[in-house]
Amino acid sequence: METFVWIVHIIASLAVIGMVLLQHGKGADMGAAFGSGSSGSLFGASGSANFLSRATGIAVTVFFLTSMGLTYFTLSKQRAPLAVKEQTPAQKTQSPVVPQPQPAVPVGSKAKEIPN
């Protein structure tokens, strides 16, 4: 399942990149407004979104959802319980090593002596 989500994620990302690069920007219509084209308004035609912008929105939505899905897969792997390593019989008979407490004052120090 994770492999399928990765494939869809990569395809969606390439589709977003391609469609954004293919879209006609708002600034490109500016030159057409001043006599070099046949645009009817100063900042281009203002109408409903065309097919390319709607397809870009759908690809971005798919990209967002697959990103969330991949995050879910990653978090579920991190939360998985760790496998308990089986001990050999020799390891079971050995007693655990307990660290010895260290003295608070170094040996040979005169810090505990109280002057009279």
Image (cartoon, rainbow, N blue to C red):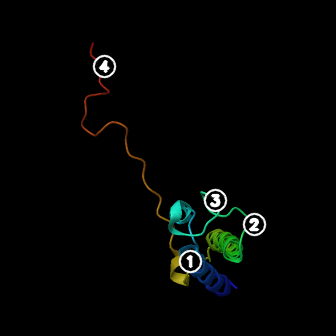
Q: Label 2 vs label 1: CA separation?
A: 18 Å
Nearer-N-terminus badge (3/1): 1
Q: What crowding class fits label 4: few (fewer than 14 Cα within 10 Å), some (14-19), or many (20 or more)?
A: few
Q: Report the quarter where the N terminus lies.
A: bottom right
Q: Name the residue under label 2.
A: 48
Q: Which of 9 and 38 is in front in this view?
A: 38
Q: Mark 4 points at which residue?
A: 114
Nearer-N-terminus badge (2/1): 1
- Which numbered disc, 4 or 3, marks the residue closer to the eye? 3
Check disc 4 and give the amino acid type. Answer: Ile
Q: Label 2 vs label 4: CA separation?
A: 91 Å
Left or right of 108? Residue 94 is right
- In the rendering, which numbered label is found on residue 22? 1
- Which numbered disc, 2 or 1, marks the residue closer to the eye? 2
Check disc 2 and give the amino acid type. Answer: Ser
- In the rendering, which numbered label is found on residue 41? 3
